[in-house]
Amino acid sequence: MVKTSFKLAQKKDLAEVIRIYNQGVLTLKAAPDVEVVTVDEKEEWFEGHLNSQHPLWLMTDLQNQVMGWVSLSKMYDRMVYDISVEISIYIDEKFQGQGLATKAITFSENQAQQLGYRNIVALIFSHNHPSKKLFKKNGYKHYGQYPDIAMIKENIVSVDIFGKKI
């Protein structure tokens, strides 16, 4: 297993975060965009993660090469949901299959607890079987599904909801 460090993302890291995110976009099963995005398009989103309550961490190896990233996002813009966060994980395709996503989940759960959260939720396209398997393996329960809620290219797809009390 690759030695991994987590560090809070900084403004200078945006281009690398978007590079890895766009790999997920191109798979048509990992990212909620259907076309690659630009740094300018995601700048406001990224700045929202440069705070202590909804952070984004880079996963780096011993040479400080970015292997992926994980973020905690606000579930909804209503105060009653502030005890829960949504997790997003994106691993560079060169490093997939090495257990990094599992490390990201474990790290994020610990960080979320320290930030006072009680629940983590993952929204996963129903056809993204590897991600669903990953979260099940890490103790997440299938809470339900938003059937036929999204369109990727010409295909109507569902979104599965996984969650875990932490």
Image (tube, grey):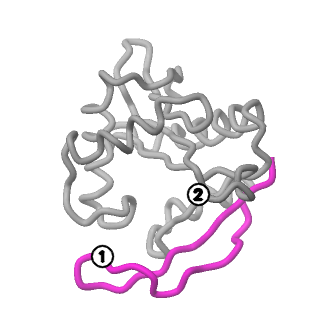
Q: Residue at x 60, y 79 (%)?
A: 145
Q: Eyeballing the image, is 1 above or below 147?
A: above
Range of the magenta residues? 140-166
Q: Is the stretch drawn in magenta largely helix, strand or loop?
A: strand
Q: Eyeballing the image, is 126 above or below 78?
A: below
Between the residue at mark 2 and the residue at mark 1, the CA separation in whole angstroms equals 25 Å
Q: Eyeballing the image, is 80 above or below 88?
A: below
Which residue, given by chain and number where applicable, does mark 1 sit on? Answer: 152
Q: Which mark is residue 17?
A: none
Q: Residue at x 34, y 21 (%)?
A: 65
Give the mark nearest the N terminus, 2 or 1.
2
In the image, residue 158 lies at what x, y percent? 48, 81
Q: Quadrant of residue 69?
A: top left
In front of the other: 135 or 88: 88
In front of the other: 110 or 129: 110
Element type at marker 2?
Answer: loop
Q: Residue at x 36, y 26 (%)?
A: 66
Q: Residue at x 34, y 24 (%)?
A: 11
Element type at marker 1?
Answer: strand
Check disc 1: other Cα within 10 Å, few if <14, some if 14-19, many if 20+: few
Instruction: Judge left or right: residue 155 versus residue 89.
Output: left
**Callout 2, which amino acid?**
Asp
Residue 163 is a magenta residue: yes
In front of the other: 40 or 110: 40
Check disc 2: other Cα within 10 Å, few if <14, some if 14-19, many if 20+: few
Which residue, given by chain and number where applicable, does mark 2 sit on? Answer: 77
Task: Check whether the beta carbons of the residues at disc 2 and disc 1 lie within 8 A of each other.
Answer: no
Q: Eyeballing the image, is 116 above or below 27?
A: above
In the image, residue 38 lies at what x, y percent? 19, 45
In the image, residue 102 lies at what x, y percent? 60, 42
Residue 98 is a magenta residue: no
